[in-house]
Structures are given as C-alpha cells and as structure tokens.
Image: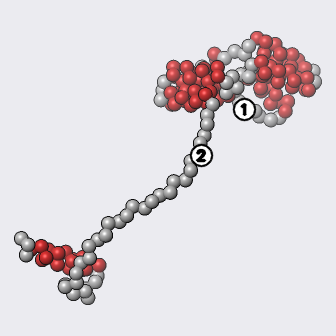
Amino acid sequence: MPDQQPEKVRLISRIYRALKGNWEVPDSTPIQPIQPIQPAVIQEKPRRTISYTPSQVKYQTGLSSYLAGDMTGASKNWNEAVKLDPTNAYAIRGLQRLNPASYQATPESMKTYNVGLDAYLKGNNQVALKQFQKALTIDPKNREARRAMERITGKVTLAL
C-alpha cells in the first residue's frame, strides 16, 4: 500500500496538469499542499433602529393576521390600535376594509359637519372649513367631513 500512494499522487498530478493544459511540467514536480482559505471578515454596518408606537405595532400585528386570513385577529388588533391612537388612519382603514358599512360618524361630529355643509352651500368656505376641521377633531374617522375639506382646499388628505 505505501508504494501505491506516490503513484496515485503522480497520476492525479498528471491529470490536473493535463486539464490545465500545462504539459511542459515534468512528472517529478512536487505537488504543493493547498492552503486552507481563511474566511473573510465581514464588517457589518450599524443598523438603524426603528421605533414603533404601540398603535403601530398593533396595526402591523393586525395586518399580519389579515394577510394570513385571520379576520378576527385583524379586527381585534386594529380596534386596539385605534383605541391607543384614534388618528391611526391605517388601522381605521383596515377596519373599514373588514366591514365598510359598520362605521358611523358620531352624532356630535355629524351635527358639526352639517353646520359646515350649510355654510359651504351658502358659499362661505372659511366658516365651512372651520366646521369640517372641528368635526374631524371630534371624530377623526368622519369621512364626509374629510371629503368636504378636500373639496374646499383642493388637497387630498389621507383617505379614511
């Protein structure tokens, strides 16, 4: 067996040189052992930390549930997000997506909206705009007041 080892090495060496196209090297050329490759050291960049509010966390959890098909979990998390932050438009929109007909503006907000609508129909846009803003302060989910403000200002705000 010990005699066959150098013969195997010579044969492998000849095959290697033949594949590389190096025919001029004599068979007696010693084969150098291959040095192990050292793994490269990768310098990681410092990562930015993103902080989320509790309402945003609940919204994201609800979105994950929604995408997984769990409508009950989505509704629960989005309701909690709205309780934590009543102006979280994403959670409000998610709830409207689950059951669009279920949302009703508060009576006080609708009363203020109607006063603004009356002023708008009479051409008094400044008073109307103030009333619509007041209606949105009372109930940020009041879609009618938000759309009326968009008509007056010409600017589209976050659709709820």
Which residue is identified by label 1? 158
Left or right relative to 18: residue 104: right
Q: Earlier in the sequence, mark 1 or mark 2?
A: 2
For badge 2, the amino acid type reads Arg
Q: Identify which residue, 51 or 149, lies in the foreground.
A: 51
Residue 96 visible in image = no
Which residue is identified by label 2? 48
- 157 w.r.t. 4: above or below: above
Residue 117, position in %: x, y? 85, 19
For badge 1, the amino acid type reads Leu
Quarter of the N terminus within the rendering: bottom left
Residue 136, position in %: x, y? 78, 22
Q: Identify which residue, 42 or 135, lies in the foreground.
A: 42
Residue 147, position in %: x, y? 77, 27
Q: Residue at x 7, y 75 (%)?
A: 3
Q: Residue at x 56, y 47 (%)?
A: 47
Left or right relative to 105: residue 148: right
C-alpha gap between disc 1 and disc 2: 27 Å
